Amino acid sequence: MKYKFRSAFCMACALLLVGAAFAMTWTSPKGFLTDDTYIDKSLPDENFGTEEILWVTSEGGDPQREAWISFNTVVMIESLKIKSLEEVSSATIRVYATEVENPGEMELHFYSSGFFEETVVWDGKPDYDVDVEGVIDVDEEGWYEIDATSLIKKAILECKDCPFSAVLVAKGDASVGFASKEDPEGNGPVLKVTTITA
């Protein structure tokens, strides 16, 4: 009787394992963020790739300064062993607000390539997607998480072998400075992705 019960219990456990889904969360290591900078409409030919702050500013809803952040798609896909978009359960980009001149909303946009932080300027800047992939409301200094699930799925679909970029654009009259990868406290942008596989 004991043997039959043990066999039935083992069989039930095996069936549960077969149908179970396995979750894995990956946080971007140092070096995954390849480039970051901000660009300034009032200084269209100046480059800010070595600055410690990524400024995001708008006046009357018109973007004046945008933050650009480029990530390594290949490392992400290989680390998570992603085979399909359906495996991506969630993703966030964490940014640290170091200065809040005017609180307000920040939109996240997708750009299907990387850029060189030493050369990118406002004049002739790349065109990012108009679709808003995520929004945060910044009202004080500290960490913020932006839902980047749809952005990461776009990156996997369109940029398997190349970098992709996230662009932060302010709404209204907001003006916020976020820590860049050059931040001495190490509070640069961080990507976290969770996958679920059967």
Image: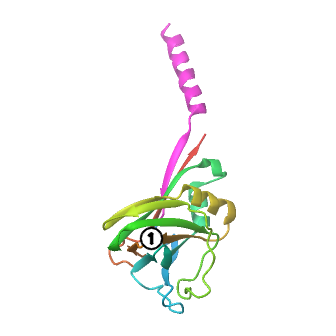
Q: Nearer the viewer, residue 124 or 47?
A: 124
Residue 182 falls left or right of residue 164:
left
Q: Which of 12 and 181 is in front in this view?
A: 181
Question: Looking at the picture, how far across and down is residue 80, in whole percent?
Answer: 57, 55
Question: Looking at the picture, how far across and down is residue 157, in whole percent?
Answer: 68, 60
Give the residues in magenta: 1-28
Residue 58 falls left or right of residue 110:
left
- Residue 193 seen in the current view: no
Task: Report which residue position mark 1 lands on.
Answer: 172
Q: Type of residue at label 1? A: Gly
Residue, x 61% and y 59% (percent of image)? Answer: 77
- Residue 40 seen in the current view: yes
Residue, x 39% and y 81% (percent of image)? Answer: 52
Q: Considering only vertical position in the picture, is 135 above or below 30?
A: above
Toward the top, the furthest residue is: 1
Q: Main secondary structure of the magenta part?
A: helix
Question: Looking at the picture, how far across and down is residue 156, in whole percent?
Answer: 64, 60
